[in-house]
Image: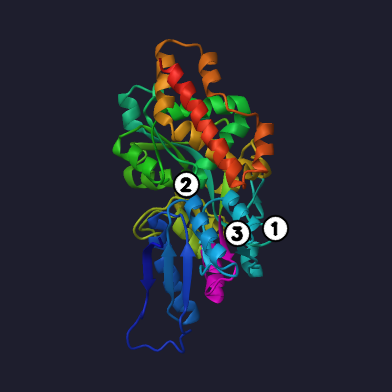
């Protein structure tokens, strides 16, 4: 079902003034997993910008199907009906891996930015490409990944905040983590991949399994774990930096925190692209230029209320336009990604190849039968089982090499469904046996 969470139409700015001939039917249709606050800040500013620059009103239709994966499925279904056009102009947000999938499906359209604007955008930050070589997508922001914390709740629990990803597997955080299902969230999928690549396949799965046993609830929405931490239902949530930064900006760093793990940290671009067969191509191009401009990117880094910044909500994101940071100087609440240092580089090609099979595997053995998993791990912990015994329970059904080979067949629904069902049946039996 198509959900229009926000349709904005500016019919006039100043009554009694003529602005010249309008572009009849100026409109842009955007699909995005971005939270409502980004929509509410960028859309009105785009309408204002459009009126001033092009002397025309513009309508913005915003489609939200949930998380990144949900939006990709929606666009895919549209192209399946009409291979020439989805009827949507812009896909905005979701991480480089998601846009790799869109590009692989030939859903994206090449667009060359103006030379002046392209000079303001770095080709790479911390070794990570900020736009695609084919010029089909451009990073509109940069994201890092870490752990959102409720400082007051941790103090009450007399528990130290985690410092590294592996700390999320510690029994002291049992039922104190809220996390998102990676089958619905591109950010959650990337964080799982960071753990698997950073720690290695076997150790990574041990961490992910113990962490899943500590999760109170897996959610479909990336914003729900943030709400759970803010409300005090849990003390921790692995998340993208900007979800945490916005709440910290609103509620204070004395109450909430964000931990950038000291072991493995990466940056990921948050792309924007024009879809193939965009029905409003010219307006879509103008939206691309707007979103990447230094002026529009001030919405990402300035606190609400600052001149040129957001009106309703602090967004707390990292801009990618160099000129933005030159203009806002010390007023920015966001870290400058150009200063980001890390010794860890994610293997993007491997991550892209394994993404779907990893999401399904984690969904099958950690989420769909989470109650059985939690009971098993809690029982072993209570009995004082050796870490090796818990590790054996959580061992994945295949090696990384075998997973890479199986990924080549993962588009076959018969193989995929049969394999997922076998995983669920096998691990459910394991967990039940370990619960006794």
Q: Quadrant of residue 342?
A: top right
Q: Is residue 424 magenta?
A: no
Image point (38%, 64%), residue name: 4
Residue at 54 percent across and 59 percent down: it is 76
**Residue at image mark 1:** 133
Instruction: Out of 63 and 258, give the one closest to the viewer.
Output: 63
Identify the mark nearer the N-term, 3 or 1: 1
Q: Secondary structure at mark 2?
A: loop
Q: Are marks 1 and 2 in contact (CB under 8 Å)?
A: no
Residue 277 image position (x, y, % from top left): 59, 71
The image quarter containing residue 81 is bottom right
Magenta segment: 271-294
Check the image and report above or below for 360 versus 96.
Answer: above
Above/below status of 198 relative to 67: above
Secondary element type, mark 3:
strand
**Which residue is at a point 57% across and 30% down the rendered structure image?**
263
Residue 184 is labelled as 2
- Of the residues under marks 1 and 2, which one precedes in the sequence? 1
Image position of 359 (left or right of 299): right
Q: Residues within 10 Å of mark 2 (few under 14, many from 20)?
A: many
Badge 3: few (under 14), some or many (20 or more) residues near its Cα, within 10 Å? many
In the foreground, 170 or 407: 407
Q: Is residue 9 above or below residue 230?
A: below
């Amino acid at each position: 079902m198509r959900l229009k969470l926000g349709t904005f139409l500016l019919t006039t700015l100043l009554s009694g003034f003529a602005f010249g001939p309008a572009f009849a039917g100026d409109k842009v249709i955007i699909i995005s997993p971005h939270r409502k606050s980004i929509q509410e800040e960028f859309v009105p500013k785009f309408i204002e910008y459009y009126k001033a620059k092009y002397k025309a009103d513009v309508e913005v239709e915003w489609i939200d199907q949930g998380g990144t994966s949900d939006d990709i499925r929606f666009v895919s279904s549209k192209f399946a009906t009409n291979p020439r056009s989805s009827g949507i102009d812009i896909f905005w947000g979701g991480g480089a891996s998601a846009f790799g999938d869109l590009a692989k499906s030939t859903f994206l359209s090449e667009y060359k930015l103006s030379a002046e604007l392209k000079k303001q955008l770095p080709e790479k930050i911390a070794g990570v490409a900020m736009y695609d070589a084919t010029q089909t997508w451009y990073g509109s922001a940069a994201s890092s990944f870490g752990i959102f914390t409720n400082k007051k709740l941790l103090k009450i629990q007399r528990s130290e905040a985690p410092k590294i990803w592996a700390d999320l597997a510690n029994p002291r955080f049992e039922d104190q983590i809220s996390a998102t299902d990676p089958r619905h969230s591109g950010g959650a999928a990337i964080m799982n991949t960071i753990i698997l690549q950073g720690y290695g396949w076997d150790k990574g799965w041990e961490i992910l399994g113990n962490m899943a046993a500590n999760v109170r609830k897996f959610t479909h929405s990336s914003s729900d774990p943030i709400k759970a931490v803010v409300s005090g239902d849990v003390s921790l949530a692995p998340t993208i930096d900007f979800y945490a930064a916005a709440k910290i900006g609103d509620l204070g760093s004395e109450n909430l925190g964000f931990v950038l793990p000291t072991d493995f940290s990466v940056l990921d671009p948050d792309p924007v692209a024009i879809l193939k067969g965009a029905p409003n191509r010219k307006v879509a191009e103008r939206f691309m230029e707007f979103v990447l401009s230094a002026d529009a990117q001030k919405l990402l880094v300035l606190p609400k209320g600052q001149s040129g910044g957001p009106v309703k909500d602090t967004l707390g994101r990292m801009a990618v336009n160099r000129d933005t940071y030159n203009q806002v100087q010390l007023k920015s609440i966001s870290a400058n990604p150009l200063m980001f240092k890390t010794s860890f580089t994610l293997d993007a090609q491997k991550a892209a190849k394994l993404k779907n099979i990893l999401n399904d595997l984690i969904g099958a053995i950690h989420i769909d039968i989470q109650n059985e998993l939690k009971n098993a791990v809690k029982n072993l912990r209570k009995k004082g089982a050796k870490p090796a015994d818990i590790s054996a329970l959580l061992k994945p059904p295949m090696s990384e090499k075998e997973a890479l080979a199986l990924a080549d067949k993962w588009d076959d629904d018969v193989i995929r469904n049969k394999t997922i069902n076998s995983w669920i049946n096998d691990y459910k039996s394991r967990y039940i046996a370990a619960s006794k």
